[in-house]
Image (cartoon, helix red, strand yellow):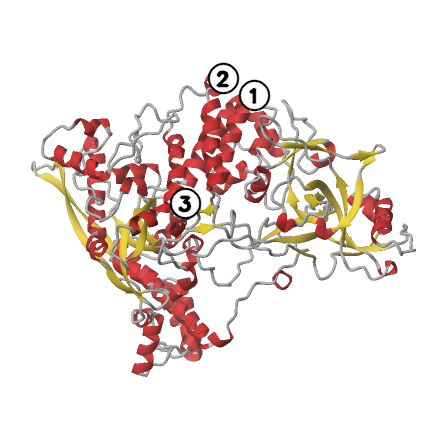
Amino acid sequence: VFERYYEHKEKEGEDEWAPFADREEWGLAEWLIKSLGQTRTDEFLKLPITQNRTMPSFHNNRSFLQLVDKLPHGASWSCKKVTVEGNQEDEDGQLLSEDVEIWMRDPVECIRDLIGNPLFKDHMAYAPSRAYKDRAGTHRVIDDMWTADWWWEKQKEMPEGATLAPIILASDKTSLSQFRGDKSAWPVYLSIGNIAKEKRRQTSARATVLIGYLPASKLDCFTHDTRSLAGYRLFHHCMSLLLQPLIAAGQEGVEMVCADALVRRVFPILAAYVADFPEQCLVACCKENWCPKCLVAADERGDPLSSLMRDARSTRETLERRKNGQHPPEFDHHGLRAVYRPFWANLPHADIFTAFTPDLLHQLHKGVFKDHLVKWCLDIVGGEEMDARFKAMPNYPGLRHFKKGITTVKQWTGTEHKEMQRVFIGLITGAVPNRVMVVARAVLDFCYYAQLRMHTNESLDALDNALAVFHAHKDILKDLEVREHFNIPKLHQLSHYVHSIKLFGAADGFNTELPERLHIDFAKEAYRASNKRDYEEQMAMWLQRQESIFWRTSYFEWLTAHRNSSCVASQTVRGEDVYDSDSDTDDEALETHVTAPRPDPSLPIVAEQLQMRHILAKTPAHPRQTVQHLVTAHGATDFLPALKSFLRRQIPNNHVVPGYQDRFDVFRQVAIVIPPDGRVSEFPKRLRIRATAEVPPSGRKSGSPARFDMALVTHDGVHASRMCTLESVRVAQIRVIFTLPRQFGVYSRPLAYVEWFTPLREPNQFSRLRQVSRSTRQLRRNAAVVHVEELIRPCHLIPKFGPKIDPHWRSATVYETANDFYLNDFIDVDTFCLSAGIT
């Protein structure tokens, strides 16, 4: 695409910045479109300083937009009006009707733009492949769509040489007006499975595009009892109009120039549909008390049954017979709605019922976890006790601290649900019966296994096992009169996760969080840019102009890379250059995005032997600190004995004995760059371990409590890159991070004063958490000095609360007042995988 545009401009002799005068004017235009509305743009362009000094070639908003409209853009917008005949009568006895609009773009042209975008070249696959985590090819890996089964199965149905473009659709009705008004929009988004899911999930990459706005009418022309069915039918009719071009394209194929500049015959086939549960039922033409994927009875969804999957062909036949006046028993037995022309009926090679993908946000985080498990445990533990435990939870970098508990929170976000999951198991241990503990652990295990970005047979078996354990023990909640039944739609959906992952790849590539995030850019911001009247047309035009600017910006990025291709090399972001490890930032994990090309997906995946890096600030935050300060402010009571022991082991020829007269450069924290873990992310991860003394209040500043983080420390010489379980590590609390002064010779390796905990015990039978306690020697805390590079990663300990929390425990001091703790497996997915031993 960019090459053709470049050749066109060269042939026509146009300046590369045209229709704008030069680079500076293009920069101004880019800023105006992204930052100002039309009224503000007009005001800015009429300012004397703009007209007399800047002097752009456009003098008002109208002439500016005329230039923007000359820029290339994606598929154009069009509008179709649909007249809906209602069943209510007006005052004259005439049936009421309503005209609605559907704004749409050609989905085939949108696919052409996506598959031909050269910016996706290193993130694109054109054929299915098998991925393995070993060179022998014995342990299969499933991550992106091209590594899963659906593509392989559909490829066999295609003509020889055909290239599949697996279509991923998403739709979700959203409110546009805030605080007042009832304006809403119904966006439909499209992406293709050829693009790597990490790229699809980046909203800034625009790998998922808007293809239409469905009418969000209330259909007041219908009576209340028929309005719902009329809404079903209108949705399917409009989706049929929107997706009409996909029928011929899926049957015959369309020649497209791909991102690697090769021309292929592409067959766009509907593969996956991302939607929440009500929208899945809407698409499947079934009632909301039925499963949109299978034929499980409405009163058996709480049982671990393997039900027959819905069949698209038989469903079409049943609806057709119903339309013709017959009364097929399958219509009621399958919970169908009388939608006689479902939009998916004529889409080639598509199976809409298998297309529904796992919804991690609504089904897991918000559904089974927050709406059910948390509520059950609250009923057992009590709100006051639960809040007290959340308040006393020890700090961890990046962990949300619910300072007021959870019972007073009125509105939750998906992020807050995940934050609760990170501490929930350790928090309720001891407060709920053992069998309830097993149920809770099974739900959290399922949540964590389901969000892995890469799966093996081992992880999928673990996913199945977690659900089986839940069903085996769930009746305890009936015995406790917490729950009467488990006929919960979202709970039943979990039984389809493993099958969907095997078909389409890891569930993180189809999360409904992405469409909800896209609503901000493609619906809410577009609505704010309109005058709120006849807003759909204004939204479409605003989005087209935004896309033009984005397309042109991408073209200039490509052009720069094209001109400098001879000297472009893979670059990695060096942590030392971009990160001050002694800053006060409270981000738990700052991802370092590597710009190296994505590996060939057809090659086996092997473990990368990348080195873990430990990064200290270039200059210490607290230089030349006395030993007495370390003892009083950091609690390093045995600093000198531990340092002497270290020097005897590491520098046996040293004859300088450390004493109270020595001063040490002290650092606030160490940043650890963790090599990529394919199960969690393809990028390196930055974690922090803090060792900061308390800062008392001063003037208007409130001060801050001491932060002496826990860490996993390696021993027996086990290298971090080879660590697959927790067997080779111990837990320690980091009190001081320092370097030796010059009198001890040239010893540049940074050190840490740590206080040991006992070795990890065997997992608890019910919570499966490992318990640790303070390690003591001669009634004093067991301390040592170790090299900073022996710190593997931070960890989180949760105090052993017991049946009732100690009322004196506080978040800032509980590490000092409690003695027994649980290692928190759920603090992040990396630690969970280490604890579970999933390789």
- Asked if the residue under mark 1 is in contact with the one under mark 2, i.e. CB atoms within 8 Å, the reply is yes
The residue lying toward the viewer, choosing from 383 and 239, is 239
| 775 on left or right of 505 | right
> Circle 2 sits in a helix, a strand or a loop, which is it?
loop
Q: Position of residue 773 (x, y in %)?
A: 72, 32
Q: Is residue 490 left or right of residue 137?
A: left
| Quadrant of the frame with the N terminus | bottom left
User: Does any portion of residue 709 appear in the rendered image?
Assistant: no
- Kind of residue sitting beneath label 1: Pro
- Percent x, y of residue 712: 68, 43
Report crowding for label 3: few under 14, some 14 to 19, many 20 or more residues within 10 A (C-alpha): many
Q: Earlier in the sequence, mark 2 or mark 3?
A: 2
Q: Which residue is identified by label 1?
A: 433
Q: CA distance from mark 3 to mark 1?
A: 33 Å
Q: Residue 315, position in %: x, y?
A: 21, 36
Counting residues from the N terminus, which is met first, the one under dot 2 or under dot 1? 1
Q: Secondary structure at mark 1?
A: loop
Q: Alpha-carbon distance for marks 2 and 3?
A: 34 Å
| Image side of residue 269 versus residue 745, left or right | left
Secondary structure beneath label 3 = loop
Whole-angstrom CA distance, mark 2 to mark 1, is: 10 Å
Q: Dot 2 corresponds to which residue?
A: 480
Looking at the rendered structure, the kind of residue marked 3 is Asn
Local crowd size for mark 1, using a 10 Å CA cut-off: few (<14), some (14–19), many (≥20): some
Residue under pointer 3: 511
Pointer 3 or 1: first along the chain: 1
Residue 706 shows in this picture: yes
What amino acid is at disc 2? Leu
Tell me the residue at 61%/29% (across/down).
388
The residue most toward the front is 136
